[in-house]
Image (spheres, helix red, strand yellow):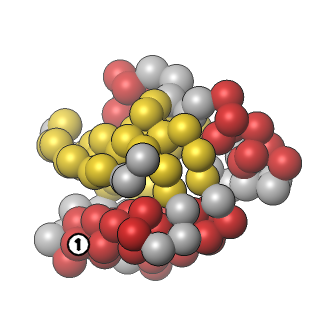
């Protein structure tokens, strides 16, 4: 299933709802384009809702890290919301679970932005 991304504003935070697979090719390219587009629009607080993302491959992981770095370099913050068990396990195996702020509740995640 191809990756789909929509975004909505929640105060000063932009919530990006993702669904599908973040894999080499279109999936990771769409994630990169979405994050870079938000940064170009001066939207620096980004919450990625991964509730409907069922699979991430190594290029998808790389794009998450690249996006996180790009946002941090612009003085912003990127957080993750509602990881599926498979995605959470993958982030724990790769030790990236400790790099990202991960939330299960959108209201708590929005409150986590300063």
Nearest the viewer among 49 and 46 is 49
Percent from the top left, x then y, of residue 54?
54, 38
Nearest the viewer among 59 and 64 is 59
Could you tell me which quadrant the C terminus lies in?
A: top left
Residue placed furthest toward the front = 1
Q: Does dot 1 land on a helix, a strand or a loop?
A: helix
Residue at the image point whose x is 30% and y is 73% from the top? 33
Q: Image check: 11 left or right of 59? A: left
Q: Image check: 85 left or right of 64? A: right
Image quarter of residue 24: bottom right
Nearest the viewer among 78 and 2 is 2
Q: Image check: 82 left or right of 74? A: right
In the picture of the structure, the residue carrying the numbered disc 1 is 37
Residue at the image point whose x is 20% and y is 47% from the top? 7
Image quarter of residue 99: bottom right
10 in relation to 45, above or below: above
* Count of numbered circles in the view: 1
16 in relation to 35, above or below: above
Nearest the viewer among 86 and 69 is 86
Percent from the top left, x then y, of residue 112?
44, 36
Percent from the top left, x then y, of residue 45?
32, 54
Residue at the image point whose x is 36% and y is 45% from the top? 18
Crowding at dot 1, Cα within 10 Å, few <14 / some 14-19 / many 20+, comes out as few
Residue 60 visible in the current orientation:
yes
Residue at the image point whose x is 15% and y is 71% from the top? 41
Residue 69 visible in the current orientation:
no
Percent from the top left, x then y, of residue 85?
67, 28
């Amino acid at each position: 299933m191809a990756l789909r991304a929509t975004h909505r504003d929640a105060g000063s935070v932009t919530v990006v709802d993702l669904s599908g697979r973040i894999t080499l090719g279109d999936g990771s390219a769409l994630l990169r384009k979405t994050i870079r587009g938000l940064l170009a629009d001066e939207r620096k607080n980004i919450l990625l809702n991964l509730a409907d993302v069922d699979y991430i491959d190594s290029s998808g992981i790389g794009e998450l890290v690249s996006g996180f770095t790009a946002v941090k370099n612009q003085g912003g913050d990127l957080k993750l919301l509602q990881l599926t068990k498979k995605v959470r396990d993958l982030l724990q195996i790769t030790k990236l679970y400790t790099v990202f702020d991960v939330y299960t509740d959108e209201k708590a995640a929005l409150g986590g932005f300063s």
